[in-house]
Structure formats: structure tokens, C-alpha cells
Image (cartoon, rainbow, N blue to C red):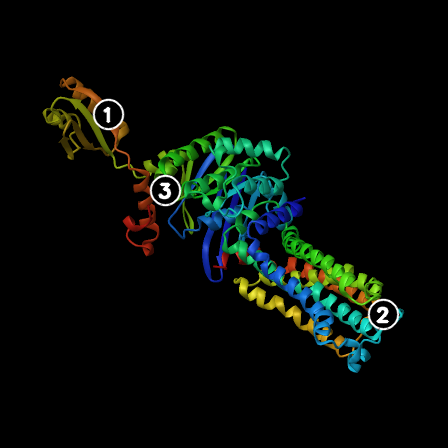
Amino acid sequence: MIAATGLTRRFGSRTVVNDVTFDVGRGEILALLGPNGAGKTTTLRMLAGLIAPTSGTVAIDGVQLTRATGSALRSRIGFLTEAPGLWDRLTVRENLRIYAGLYALANADATIDRALETFELTGRGSVRTAELSKGTRQKVALARALLHEPPILLLDEPTSGLDPEVTRSVRKLLEERRQAGCAILVSTHNLDEAERLADRVAVLHERLLALDRPATLRQRLTTGRLIVRLAGDPSAYIDAARTALPDVVDIAADGTALTLRLSDPERQTPALVAALVAAGARVLEVRAEMPALEEVYLHLMGDTDRGIGEPGCAYER
Amino acid sequence: MRIRTLITKEFLDIARNRAALVPVVLVTVMSLVLPFGIAIVVPALTGRGLGHDADLVNVSAAAGADYDLSNDARVQLFLFQQFLMLFLLTPITGAMALAAHAIVGEKQARTLEPLLATPITTFELLAAKVFGALAPTFAISLIGLALYAGGILLFAAPGVAMAMASARTLMLILVVAPTAALVSLQSAILISSRVNDARTAQQFGVLIIIPLTGVLVAQFTGSLWLSASALGLAGLGLLVLWILLALLSVVVFERESILTRWR
């Protein structure tokens, strides 16, 4: 539904987004992950038709986004901006009614009622938005972005600064929109959110550093460490493990588990388990140690741009 | 449809921020008080009618030429006609604050980006901003106009009210005032979309007062008398100028610069 091809954006001599290509399909959530200043908002603005790429193209449902097609295509997009951008002197309902008018919605009042109900804002319709908490303002902004039931959602930091309860309700809502077939692009620097929410993750830092499913990205940094949890003292089975895998030297007993660094887990794991069982061990669990997405992210940032500091400082929580 | 929707938003915003209209109301009240003070109150207090001033009688000669008026009435008619122009146009300078704030204000409140992400076109956005600032100002002007006409009927010399109801007055009210307002507000909107500070836009916008003052001074000194047809032509010129400014506003409105460079 969304196809970005070779997107590049320069501001003067500064390149903010460099040759970025990705697509987001129907019923998919893609998380755009990157530190502050990585070009996430600029990318979203280009996709929403707010700013033009210096080079490259954006296509929505196969139609190229241009000045001529912008107005029509924007009606298919729900865009949550970084700041809620509500008119403070207007009430929640008035804010939504103006946007319902801009999208030429029929039965605007009924649509607004539904949106207020969805976001648990029914009792807040007549409250001026200046009087709302940050979380509630964000909910109103989300309600506004979803008001015209767009098939495409571009969300810039949708849960930034929200409390866990509201964050969870936003995630639930995005799940529902995904189920409904929306193509959703979420910009975030919250790794946990990206991992929980997204089907795929695009790591952006001026250029696209990686684009894949979170699990696949994690596998890139698989440590090769195998953890075998056993009933009883694991140190009693170290010899059995060494006998089964004589070329593996890094074997340790840690609490209730044996940990081993394998060079070829696919081949070595079955032999190891068979040897342990033969030695009388009761195997409770066998799993490969996987890095968190955070480690993958920091690794990518550290490897590709030392200029932003040590890997551990590459992003803000 | 989208223009009407956004104008509704402007009205709601102004209705919740009535203080923004105080300058318009103040200027209207002053423009009401001033002519009645000069033409009615001062002569009544001094006991010396305006018709005794030969210079005033001379510059007033062209006013109400078709009517058989006393010197006092003719000078009053002249003054009320001149002040009518001032009265109709000066509230626009008050509305300049609204227009000057139109784009830069949305940007500063961070409400512009979600607005630009809707299907609204630049023309629709700018048109809504112009008419959103014009309508409340014009409504106040019309209320003032009713008071102005009522005051002339009640307090002016016999025949003045009848002589005021002329083609020239109609031209001023129906043609010159709205077109001049459109030109000045469109200028303010244009500037508002090119600067990053509402005060700058406002300072540029009020420059419209300079040609207006020039016309008024020329008329008061008798060196210029704008007839109904001259006012009609002026209105036409202003209309053309407004259309050109509206087109220019659309051309120079740069969404990108506004979103990415203004802070």
C-alpha cells in the first residue's frame, strides 16, 4: 500500500534521509526505528506528502504522490504528528468536527461519537483541549488521525510520553487497525514498542541500516550460546557434554543450566541432548540465547555510525 | 466545503478569544465618536456652526451638490462622507492582528502540520484564513454602520441623512470597503506565510493605512474628490489587486519551508 523508493531528502548541504527504500503492505505494521535526528519524521512527512523528496518516489496504492495527486492521496492517510496539534480553545468534539468537515465525512456526529467511545473520551467531548492531560491530548490526536478510517496510518511516536495504561490501549487499537487491513507505519525510538507491535522493523539512521522481522534481526546477532536447563545440579553433566562434543571447550554450569557456545547449533544440539539424556539428565528446556532487539539496534548503530558516540549512547529511552 | 469548515473553526476560535476583537471594536467606536464630536458636539458646545468656516464651506462644495442644503448641513455632509470611508476601513487595521496571526499562529501552536496533512489545498487554507478574519471584522463594521446612520438621522442637520443615501455612499459600503479589506487582509496572510513571527506580519500589514490616510488627507484638503464612479473604479482596481494577491499567496506559500525551517 505504501512504497518508498530511493527516498532522499537534503536540507541545503545536509542529507537527512539518504536513499531509503521500503514498503508497507496491507495489514502490516512497520516500525521505523532510529535515534533522534535519524530522519524518521522527515520520512513520515515525505510519505504524507507534506514535503517533497529531493529524489526518490512515494507511491500510495500504486499512485505516485505528487503535487497534483497529493490532496486526493492525503484523504487516504491518517497522520499523527509528533505534537498533538490540537486547537486549544476548541473542545474535543469541535476539534474532531472540524477535521470531519475537512475530510467531508457524512454523518460526522455519529463518526465522532464512535471515535470518542473508542478512545474512552465520551465524557470529555465538551472539554476544551487546553484543559486535557498530555495523554488525553494524544488520544484526541489519535482519534483525529483515525476519524476518516484511513487505510494508511503514519504515526510519529504515538505512545511517546503516555502512561502504561494509555500506551496499552493505543497498542490494542493499532492491532485492531492492522486486523482491519490498514498499512501502518510507526516511528519510534522505543525498542520495546517496536518489538511488541511491529511485523517488521526498519532501522533508520539517515539511511536504512536494516529492514526485517524483529526475530530475524535478532538472529543476525545470535551468540551461538545454547542454554540447557536441567533438573538437579547441572555441573554433574559437564563431562557428558564434553564427551559428546569434544570440540566445544566453552561449557559452564550456571545455576540450574548448562551453557555452551556451539559453532554449529543445528548439528550439535541433537547430539548434546541425546548424550545428556543417556547420562541420566532430566532436560527441562533447551534454547538458543537470542539477543534483545535493543542489542541488535545498538550493534547496528555502533557499527555504522561511530560518530554518534559509543553504541550504548546511540538512542534515548 | 473545506473553506466553510475552516472558517467555522476561525469563528469558534475568535468566539473563545473575544479579546482579539477588542482593537476592532475600539477603532470602530473611536471612528463613530470622532465625526459626531467634530460635526455635532463641538459646534453645539461652542455655539458656532461649521458653516461659518469659509475654508470648510469651500472644500465641502462638491458634497451633496444636488441637494439644497445650508452651509452647516453641507459641511456636516462632507465630514460624515469623509469619516464614512475612515469608519469603514480603519477596523480592518484591527483585523490585521487576526490575519497576521493566521499562518504563523498555526505554526507556533503546532496545529499547522496536522491541518496540512488533510486534503485541504493551499488555496482553500488561505481563503479560509482571509474570510475568517474578514467576516467578524465586517460584522462589527456593519453594526457600527447602523449606529452611524442612526446617529446621522437623529443628530445631523435636516437633509444630511437624505443626501448621505447616495450612490457614492453605496459604492463605499458595498464595493470599496470590502475590496480594500480583502486586499489588506490578503496582504497580511501572504506576509504571515512568509515570516516566522506574527508581529512582523502585523507591522507589514498595517502599512495599508498609509495610502488610505493619503486619500483622506487629500479629500479633506479639497485636492481630491472621489465621485461614485471613481470609487467604483477604485473598487474594481482593488478587486483585481486582491485576485492577484490571492494567486501570489498560493504561489509563494511553501509548506516545506513552513514545516521545516520555522522554529
Image coordinates of residue B128 in percent, x first then y, are 65, 51
Q: Which residue is mark 1?
A: A286
Q: Residue at x 65, y 60 (%)?
A: B249
Numbered label attached to residue A80: none
Q: CA distance from mark 3 to mark 1?
A: 30 Å
Mark closer to the chain start, 3 or 1: 3
The x, y position of residue A207, in whole percent, is 43, 50
The amino acid at mark 3 is Asn
Mark 2 element type:
loop
Left or right: residue A223 versus residue A103 is: left
Secondary structure beneath dot 1 equals: strand
- Given contact means CB atoms under 8 Å apart, are the residues at marks 2 and 1 in contact? no
> Which mark, by number, is residue B64?
2
| Quadrant assignment for the N terminus of chain A | top right
Residue at the spot x=77%, y=68% of the render? Answer: B81
Q: Amino acid at mark 1?
A: Val
Q: Chain of mark 3?
A: A
Place of residue A288 in the rendered image (x, y in percent of width and height, measured from the top left): 26, 30
Spatial CA distance of label 2 from label 3 is 77 Å
Q: Amino acid at mark 2?
A: Gly
Can residue B162 be seen at all in this image of the molecule?
Answer: yes
Residue A190: mark in rendering: 3
The subunit letter for the residue under badge 1 reads A
